[in-house]
Image: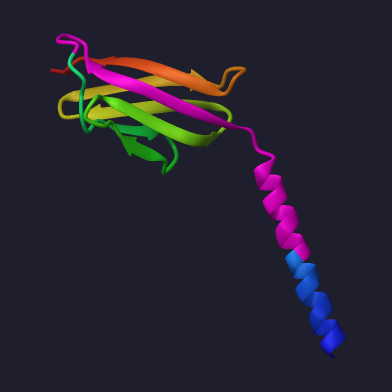
């Protein structure tokens, strides 16, 4: 019985390792940027930056900068939301897997 239990444990451990290795083979990309007001060129602090259709979200810092450091490579729509501002950017991964977005937002009336 001990041999069967050890075999089952080893088999489950091996399958978990294979699944983790497949996840690690995914090419990741980095998305960074700066968000400013389109009229005044002031950096916007606290803008919600979301990868549409996912739970991946961050906020701009005091200088208007944001970073998504490890996003699976692909094409995405990035949403930017702030009081009276809304904007979307459609992006796709490039060869070096690092994207910088310079976003100017204008107030919607």
For this rendering, which residue is in front, 98 or 53?
Answer: 98
Q: Is residue 26 magenta?
A: yes
Residue 44 is situated, as x and y percent measured from the top left of the image, at: 20, 24
User: Which range of residues does the magenta coloring cover?
Assistant: 14-41
Residue placed most toward the observer, 81 or 108: 81
Q: Residue at x 72, y 58 (%)?
A: 17
The quarter of the rendered structure image containing the C terminus is top left
- On whether residue 31 falls in the magenta region, the answer is yes
Q: Position of residue 13 (x, y in %)?
A: 74, 67
Q: Is residue 88 above or below residue 20?
A: above
Q: Quadrant of residue 77?
A: top left
Q: Is residue 38 left or right of residue 13?
A: left
Residue ranking furthest to the top: 39
Q: Give left or right: position of 75 versus 68.
A: right
Q: Which x, y percent locates residue 94?
A: 58, 18
Q: Is residue 57 above or below residue 8?
A: above
Q: Is residue 10 left or right of residue 22?
A: right
């Amino acid at each position: 019985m001990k041999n069967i239990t050890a075999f089952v444990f080893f088999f489950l451990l091996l399958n978990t390792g294979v699944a983790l290795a497949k996840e690690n083979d995914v090419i990741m990309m980095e998305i960074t940027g700066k968000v400013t007001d389109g009229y005044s060129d002031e950096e916007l602090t606290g803008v919600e930056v979301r990868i549409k259709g996912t739970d991946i979200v961050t906020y701009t810092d005091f200088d208007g900068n944001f970073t998504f450091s490890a996003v699976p490579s692909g094409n995405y729509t990035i949403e930017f939301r702030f009081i009276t501002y809304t904007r979307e950017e459609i992006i796709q991964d490039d060869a070096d897997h690092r994207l910088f977005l310079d976003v100017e937002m204008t107030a919607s009336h």
